Image: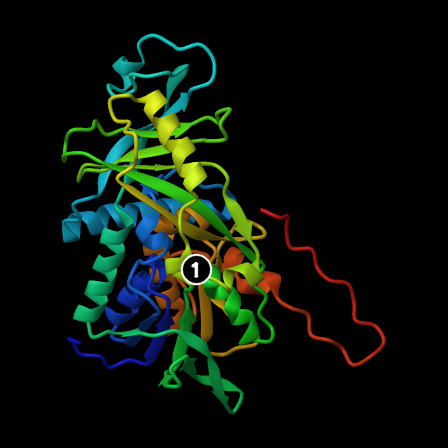
């Protein structure tokens, strides 16, 4: 642990990109940060995601997240020489129907069965999630943060305020403020905070990596239409030579009780979907396709009922905050989430973005009135 810390002690729970970004931003603002992660940094979705970045793909309240965080990614990549960050165009590809001629003129490795290819967005970018997550953790520790490998099992209170988090090993970690960034496992917080509701599923999906020499695969991201095999592939060639493939189909939406049964290391790929996706990729690009992927993996993305993240103070609490529910945009929104949450914790409000649309209070549990009439529940959104 390095650096001088003069501010409050802030405990951050969760070592994915959201937790690491939050820890980094807090530590560089002189908070004494304790980051708790049960496995390893970026061991779950933040180490197994695609890392696709799109500045102009937001809608409504998320426009600010896309634009600000995309710009932060560019600045961070330049400042810290992030090798895996680069801008690249994104193509829309269809594989159903008659094979077209000239696909290789638009993308040289699309030399298989492709029915159409078009420009989707010429100004997207990418970064390898594990690299940037670990960088954030490294910067945090260089500024005095401490990382503890342990599982959190609850919170302790005194005088109506949370004073520490309880660990499964029986220890307690004290702090002045607490930020919970546990991805889909944030559903566990419902048992710790009486007014907090986390209406969220874990979207359990498989992904593949095919390894090639660095610089040998032309940089195009692909979004493919749904095929009759149930795949809707997304393809991201990376600067280091890896070609990341997701959209294997067959994703499962796990409710709270199923999420709580799983540890990150128990989230494993579906072999049937891996086989189907491997064949679909090879049909589209025989040049890059292989009989077997070099890496097969799976992760769970946290997705709320209304499809927007939860970022803000926990209802009914004075010093506890939550940042989760980023679904497929966790890597893109990671930098701005960490910055906004650090401002909220240390200053009481974010000056970077408007956090109000993402407030956990929109799902708040109603307090029971001690009378006959309890009132009607509030509809907060559709199932995602």
- Give the image's coloring scheme: rainbow
Q: Disc 1 on helix, strand or loop?
A: helix
Is residue 57 at least partly visible in the picture?
no
Q: Is residue 283 above or below residue 368?
A: above
The quadrant where residue 14 appears: bottom left
Q: Is residue 164 above or below residue 129?
A: below
Identified at 85% across, 76% down, the residue is 372
Residue 327: x and y in percent read 45, 50
* Label 1 crowd (10 A; few <14 / some 14-19 / many >=20): many
Query: Image point 34% across, 7% down: which residue?
Result: 101
Q: Is residue 37 left or right of residue 323?
A: left
**Percent position (x, y) of residue 250?**
50, 39
In the picture, measured across the screen, residue 164 lies left or right of residue 32, that is: right
Answer with left or right where residue 50 lies relative to residue 159. left
Left or right relative to 359: residue 295: left
Residue closer to the observer: 303 or 63 = 303
Q: Which residue is drawn at 30% across and 58% down?
A: 42
Residue 275 position (above or below residue 323)? above
Q: Mark 1 points at which residue?
A: 183
Q: Position of residue 181 (x, y in %)?
A: 41, 64
Image-quadrant location for residue 374:
bottom right
Question: Seen from this angle, which residue lies furthest top?
Answer: 101
Total marks in image: 1
């Amino acid at each position: 642990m390095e650096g001088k810390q003069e501010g409050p002690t802030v405990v951050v729970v969760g070592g994915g990109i959201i937790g690491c970004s939050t820890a980094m931003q807090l530590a560089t603002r002189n908070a004494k940060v304790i980051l708790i992660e049960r496995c390893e940094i970026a061991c779950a979705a933040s180490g197994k995601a695609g890392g696709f970045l799109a500045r102009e793909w937001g809608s409504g309240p998320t426009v600010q997240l896309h634009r600000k965080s995309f710009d932060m990614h560019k600045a961070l990549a330049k400042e810290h020489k992030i090798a895996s960050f680069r801008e690249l165009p994104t193509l829309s590809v269809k594989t159903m129907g008659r094979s077209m001629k000239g696909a290789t003129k638009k993308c040289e490795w699309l030399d298989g069965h492709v029915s159409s290819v078009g420009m989707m967005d010429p100004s997207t970018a990418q970064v390898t999630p594990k690299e940037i997550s670990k960088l954030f953790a490294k910067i945090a520790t260089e500024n005095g943060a401490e990382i503890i490998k342990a599982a959190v099992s609850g919170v302790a209170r005194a005088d109506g305020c949370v004073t520490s988090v309880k660990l499964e090993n029986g220890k307690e970690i004290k702090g002045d403020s607490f930020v919970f960034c546990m991805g889909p496992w944030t559903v566990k917080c419902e048992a710790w905070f009486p007014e907090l509701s986390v209406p969220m599923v874990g979207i359990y999906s498989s992904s593949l990596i095919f390894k090639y020499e660095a610089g040998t695969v032309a940089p195009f991201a692909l979004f493919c239409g749904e095929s009759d095999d149930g795949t809707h592939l997304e393809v991201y060639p990376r600067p280091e030579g890896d070609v990341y493939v997701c959209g294997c189909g067959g994703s499962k939406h796990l409710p709270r009780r199923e999420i709580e049964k799983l540890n990150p290391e128990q989230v494993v790929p579906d072999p049937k979907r891996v086989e189907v996706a491997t064949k679909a990729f090879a049909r589209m690009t025989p040049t890059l396709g292989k009989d077997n992927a070099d890496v097969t993996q799976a992760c769970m993305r946290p997705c709320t009922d209304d499809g927007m993240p939860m970022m803000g103070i926990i209802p009914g609490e004075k010093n506890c905050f939550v940042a989760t529910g980023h679904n497929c945009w966790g890597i893109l929104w990671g930098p701005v989430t960490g910055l906004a949450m650090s401002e909220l914790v240390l200053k009481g409000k974010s000056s970077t973005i408007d956090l109000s649309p993402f407030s956990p209070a929109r799902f708040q549990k109603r307090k029971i009135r001690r009378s006959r009439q309890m009132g009607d529940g509030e509809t907060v959104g559709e199932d995602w």
